[in-house]
Image: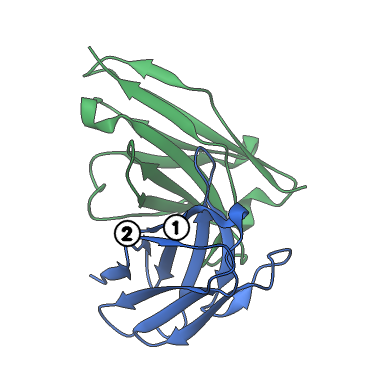
Chain colours: A blue, B green
Amino acid sequence: DIQMTQSPSSLSASVGDRVTITCQASQDISNYLNWYQQKPGKAPKLLIYDASNLETGVPSRFSGSGSGTDFTFTISSLQPEDIATYYCQQYDNLPLFGGGTKVEIK
Amino acid sequence: EVQLVQSGAEVKKPGESLKISCKGSGYSFTSYWIGWVRQMPGKGLEWMGIIYPGDSDTRYSPSFQGQVTISADKSISTAYLQWSSLKASDTAMYYCARGVVPGSPTWFDPWGQGTLVTVSS
């Protein structure tokens, strides 16, 4: 079974900082990797699909990259409204989430 | 507007059965995969399984195989998640979500609002 390792599990950054989250798959998943944002008390929201494609309506400060086993999610300039937990999700056969990264403001 | 509306919060006792629902609207229900996701209190998201209402093809994550049953009634555009005997450890928020690409369980959007299931004696 594929395992997804997401890091860090939490981070604290200042408004305007560049934030980077990584997700590593235990085997090659091509670009079958998506990123979601979940704000407290809310359902998850799709941000990035197929590793690097920005979902319609999502601000351009969010981006994704990678292929194979190593993927990166970036917020280019952290905003107060970006406080949330972010999850990667692969879809090789069955969908599978990474463990999540909680992003807080310093 | 594509929308998934889930049934309301439930409070049950251990050993009881339960079936929660997720009604799709604004799209062809039989053409898109529906997935169920568990979120235990203070924890991360876990995929439970997915169903394709068009032919009822159902796939379970290994952790949930045999623990729950996923089904769909395409006549009323509704997917279900059910338990035959609840445990306290089933206490969680449960979300349904729709696959974006017709016929392919790739990425999921939109999501239902969630159904909180509380199991307590």
B57 vs A26, nearest the viewer:
A26
Q: Looking at the picture, does residue B118 appear above or below residue B49? A: above
Q: Is residue B78 left or right of residue A40?
A: right
Instruction: Measuring from the top left, give residue B28's x and y in whole percent.
Output: 70, 52
In the current view of this chain or complex, which residue is farthest to the right?
Answer: B1
Q: Residue A56's image quarter?
A: bottom right
Q: Looking at the picture, does residue A28 appear above or below residue A46? A: below
Taking the spot 52% from the left edge, 53% from the top edge, the residue there is: A83
Q: Residues within 10 Å of mark 1 (few under 14, many from 20)?
A: many
Q: Amino acid at mark 2?
A: Gly
Q: Quadrant of the N terminus of chain A?
A: bottom left
In the current view of this chain or complex, which residue is farthest to the top?
Answer: B121
Element type at mark 1:
strand
Residue that label 2 marks: A99
Residue that label 1 marks: A103
Element type at mark 2:
loop
Q: Tell me if I can see residue B15 in this picture.
A: yes
Q: Amino acid at mark 1?
A: Val
Q: Is residue B48 left or right of residue B88?
A: right
B81 vs A37, nearest the viewer:
A37
Taking the spot 68% from the left edge, 73% from the top edge, the residue there is: A60
Read off the chain for label 2: A
Q: Residues within 10 Å of mark 2 (few under 14, many from 20)?
A: many
